[in-house]
Image (spheres, rainbow, N blue to C red):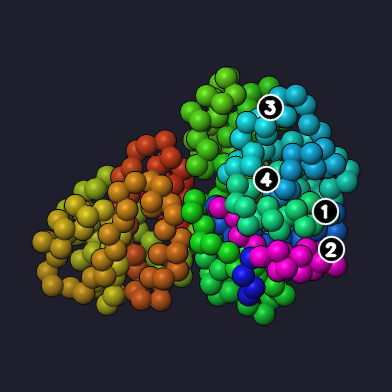
Amino acid sequence: MLAVCAESCKLAAELIKKGEIVAFPTETVYGLGANAYDTDAVAKIFVAKNRPHDNPLIVHVATTEQVAEFAYVNEFARKTMETFLPGSLTVVLPKKSTIPSAVTAGFETVAVRIPLSKEARMFLSECSVPVCAPSANTSTRPSPTRAKDVFEDLQGKIPLILCGKDCDVGIESTVLDLTSDTPTILRPGVVTKSVLERGLGISVRDFSAENKKVNSPGLRYKHYAPSVPVLLNTNGDVVKVVEKIDELHKSYDKIALFADSDVCDRVMHKINGQELLIEVLPPTAEGVAERIFALFRDYEKRCQAIVMVFEDKSEFGRSVLNRLMKSCGSHTF
């Protein structure tokens, strides 16, 4: 691992140009990058992550001017990028033939992002090519929000990890499809429907809320799951939470509870002396998003099951819930 600086970014960019893959920080999660024009380099991403080849990748660039090299950009797409990028938004555009089908899983569209992270853009600006990058973790694992998470999953599989700040958004970017008449959210994130509608001045469809399968990066397979079971409660019913903990203690010795301070206090007053690890979650969806993947990774080493209570019904809370539902296999109690 090398700390992000001018020299390390130049070294990382040289590796990209030579057909290697490099992990780098963004504000959302760490990415695993390759030259988007190099099919052999792109293939290394899928091998390192054990990622299915029909799962498309997001192409990262440092400036909006670069996007026209590999995607068709109409006036509305240009307005959207000027309004929200750099930022935690990915836009889906019609692709040009310069982008190989290995990047787009054979689709005639390409997902594009300009990260808000200055560290990410420092690295990307040194690359003379667009960089396609999924999250820098083994597929199905919690996304990496710290350099040590990348090292844990990919040590020995990639030549370089750029070590930057811990990610302060904590979940992947919103994916917005701009290839139809109505802008459509395919994956929810911190750039929410209301934020998009205010910025664009038109209605936006939220396809991600319709519980249908879509061909978008990060949506087609199991994701975000630690190595221990996650059991999710979304209504704060303390009686059910205590019953679930009692049930789990028949099979497991060490169980962790993730919940806000009120639920944690009420549960602790009701359990019958069983060993229970307590993690008090931040009071906001933003705070939970920033920490949750790291907590999954930390606690899978300390416990045999995680019971989580998440009740946030805010717009961004629904984006966080989208990730939590995938981490628990869509099973709630």
- The numbered mark, 1 or 3, whose residue comes first in the sequence reads 3
Q: What residue is at 54 percent from the left and 25 percent from the top?
A: 197
- Residues at marks 3 and 4, CA–CA distance in whole angstroms: 14 Å
How many C-alpha atoms fall within 10 Å of the one at disc 4: few (<14), some, or many (≥20)? many
The answer to whether 197 is drawn above or below residue 136 in the figure is: above
The residues tagged by marks 1 and 2 sit, at their Cα atoms, a distance apart of: 8 Å
Tag 1 or tag 4, which sits nearer the N-term?
4
Q: Residue 17, which numbered label?
A: 2
Name the side, left or right, on which 119 lies relative to 146.
right
Q: Which residue is mark 4?
A: 114
Distance from the alpha carbon under mark 4 to that under mark 1: 13 Å
Q: Residues within 10 Å of mark 3 (few under 14, many from 20)?
A: some
Q: Which residue is mark 3?
A: 79
Q: Residue furthest bottom?
A: 156
- As drawn, the residue found furthest toward the front would be 6
Look at the numbered disc 1 and give the secondary structure of its residue: loop
**Observer-nearest residue: 180 or 81?**
81
Disc 1 or 2, which lies upstream in sequence?
Answer: 2
Task: For label 2, count other residues whose C-alpha is less than 10 Å away and answer few (under 14), some (14-19) or many (20+).
Answer: some
Per the image, label 2 sits on a secondary structure element best described as helix
Label of residue 129 in the image: 1
| Residue 120, x across and y down, in percent | 65, 55
**The residue under label 2 is which amino acid type?**
Lys
Q: Is residue 26 magenta?
A: yes
- Which amino acid type is marked by label 4? Ile
